[in-house]
Image (cartoon, rainbow, N blue to C red):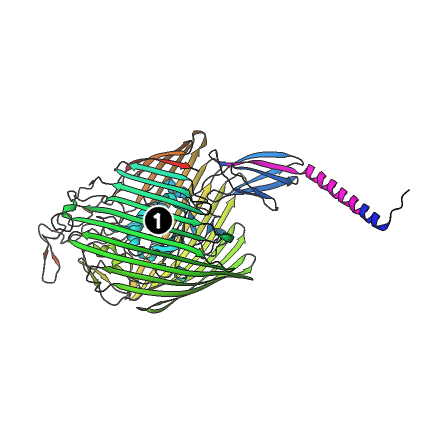
Amino acid sequence: MPILNNSSLVISRSFFGIALLFMGSFCLNAQAARLNGNISEDGNPIPYANLFLEGTTLGTATDETGNFALDGIQAGTYTLKATVLGYRPYAKKITLAASETKTIQIALVAVSEQLEETVVTGTLKAVRRSESPVPVEVYSPTFLKKNPTPNLFEALQTVNGVRPQINCNVCNTGDIHINGLEGPYTLVLIDGMPIVSGLGTVYGLSGIPNSLIDQIEIVKGPASSLYGSEAVGGLINIITKSTLEAPDFFADGFATGWGEYNLDVGAKINLGKKTDVLLGVNYFKYDTPIDNNGDNFTDLTLQDRISIFQKWNFKRKNDRILSLAGRFFYEDRWGGEMHWTPKFRGGDEIYGESIYTRRWEVLGKYQLPIIEKVLFSFSYNDHNQNSVYGDTPYLADQRIGFGQLTWDKKRGAHDLLFGAGLRYNYYDDNTTATVLPDEVIIPSVFVQDEISLAKRHSLLLGMRYDYDKRHGSIVTPRSAYRWKMTDNDIVRLNAGTGFRVVNLFTEEHAALTGAREVVVTEALKPERSFNLNLNYLKKIYADNGTFASVDASIFYTRFSNAILPDYDTDPNLIIYDNLEGKSVSQGVSANIDVMFPSGFKLLIGATFQDVRQTEKGISQRQILTEGYTGTWNLGYDLKNLHLAIDYTGNLYGPMRLPTLGEKDPRDEYSPVWSIQNIQFTYKGLKNFEVYSGIKNLLDWTPNKGNQFIIARANDPFDKNVSFDDNGDVVATADNPYGLTFDPSYVYGPNQGIRGFLGIRYRLN
């Protein structure tokens, strides 16, 4: 019998232990369960969706065909969760027996408002929305499809607390109001860069190709500590698609019963292994004058518009960022008397407002080739406008350059962001208010620190310093606190300040119509704002598959040095000065988002607000601001018919309107009004969607209940208006109310009920 020495004994024991461990592991694996299946939407596979068993470390992702497999699961009951950008999170309880292999089919539903996607607008850093200390509302391309529109301006009409405001009955230009604040208080960004500002805010929103939009991020409240001037009341950040997410080709075209035609085309082009190009084109045309309200003026401005967008992405070592994008925009629009033609442009025979707009933009991001995460972002735009309002020409050039360097650094419990920026503004026009071109360079520095106080508590502190030679030093601090009470309950408290340097003639379209004379009574000081916002987000996952979220906020914003147009003192003037008092916007807002297993979805929002100015002890509601608003988006999928039904709409409370004095017979306040739409989408064809519906189901227009909308539409050049020695209008038999021509009495679209038909094609 052989004798084993100590070494041999150790080896034998080790071998025996390994064998036992292997056999035990084999037995455990033999008893482990397996879960596999497929994830899809309406039969179309969803690749790269994440799946995990809650409370465990087990998880996987779907492949390119939407299939997945998860092994090594011990017997028991689990909650299976599936998430992917752009779709409603999925959760379901499953029970697995030992050695069982279970196959499940998961159908995800595309969502309008997203809860777990990555956002960047609130902090300039990419974080999950639920982890952001700043409340950010996010809307996906699915939301835009519920009510197809030819431009982003109209698409925002069903976003709670956000209202597209038409500022002129004749040329139909407009801006975006957030929580009742005027359009110039809203900053619009593309990929985080302040492209759409000044003149571009008035016209640039009408030319962003919807096919290239990945998501829209909205922050309500001042964000000047990160973004500088104009982000006083809130901001809208339009995030364009990356080449990884974009389809190889996309086309969407529709026409309406009013003769509007819109075409949106996008494509992805690979140029070698390291360069991808995203191309998007939007073309819109409307050339059929319609006058349903009988005032001899076009109800809808005629437009011929094209926008071309191109985005280049370059692959670099260590996944460093390098992207470059550009956009060209051209539009020819006119509105006016029905028999106006271009030969009358600028004359005083037949009234028309004709606007030629040419605009180009470039923006990009470059991550420096160093160990630290340092990013250089830049943008530049050139806007040329050739306009006439009756016989009043407005010729303007604006150029805005912006560069920003940010350093993202984590150190212990601190997530730091340091930044330095430089903004160049050039503006010139032919008005008497601009004797010399306005040219200014504004340097800035900022710092932000997000501190992890505990597992569920974080505090963000930020400070920005800007120097403007016209106004000196401007400091804007802010803070934000987030308490994640549970995984499904989040409370956020934000406090911040904002500032805005004003150029009236790039922002106030009413100042350009020629109908009223503009008077600036003093050297205008920059506006300042202070904001408080308390936000609560609740997510609910029911056992039957129902998902719901409640997003509610209480907001308060106070302005000093507010600059608001005074339409009331003199009907022939628009008077601008700094408010000697205060301007306050306060209210409550809430969104409820629910998805049922039956395929029924709803997104309902409401805002109640009080926006008013107090000066010399007198308080009054801000003009063109509603006291309450409601929005809804109801959808139902008939899966067996491959048919989706969407019913969208909004409701606005009364708002004070710019009348022309006591004798003006038009209503001083608007009625309660609503725009409602319905759409049917058929998805039974591979790569195609066909959609059709009706817009403005109630056929509502502002002229209902009013004798007229445009004052003195029969005499737009005031040739038959009599004035006394003080310049006041004298009432005559031809002019019994003592009015002058004025198209500024407008609060909603003049377009009535209309049908639409469209088709989409997508190739991956």
Task: Give the residue at the far front of this rendering.
Answer: 272
Residue 760 visible here:
yes
Q: Which residues are magenta?
A: 13-39
x%, y% of residue 271?
Answer: 42, 44
Task: Give the residue at the far top of this rendering.
Answer: 641
Residue 176 visible here:
no
Q: Which residue lies under the disc numbered 1?
A: 629
Locate residue 304: give its quadrant.
top left
x%, y% of residue 284?
Answer: 29, 42
Mark 1 is on which residue type?
Answer: Thr
Residue 544 located within the stretch drawn in magenta? no
Residue 26 located within the stretch drawn in magenta? yes
- Residue 64 vs residue 523, the one in the foreground: 64
x%, y% of residue 357?
Answer: 25, 50
x%, y% of residue 111?
Answer: 44, 42
Quadrant, the C terminus: top left
Main SS category, magenta section: helix
- Residue 253 vs residue 517, the one in the foreground: 253
Left or right: 398 with respect to 760?
Answer: left
- Residue 2 vs residue 188, the one in the foreground: 2
The residue lying at 51 percent from left, 45 percent from top is 540
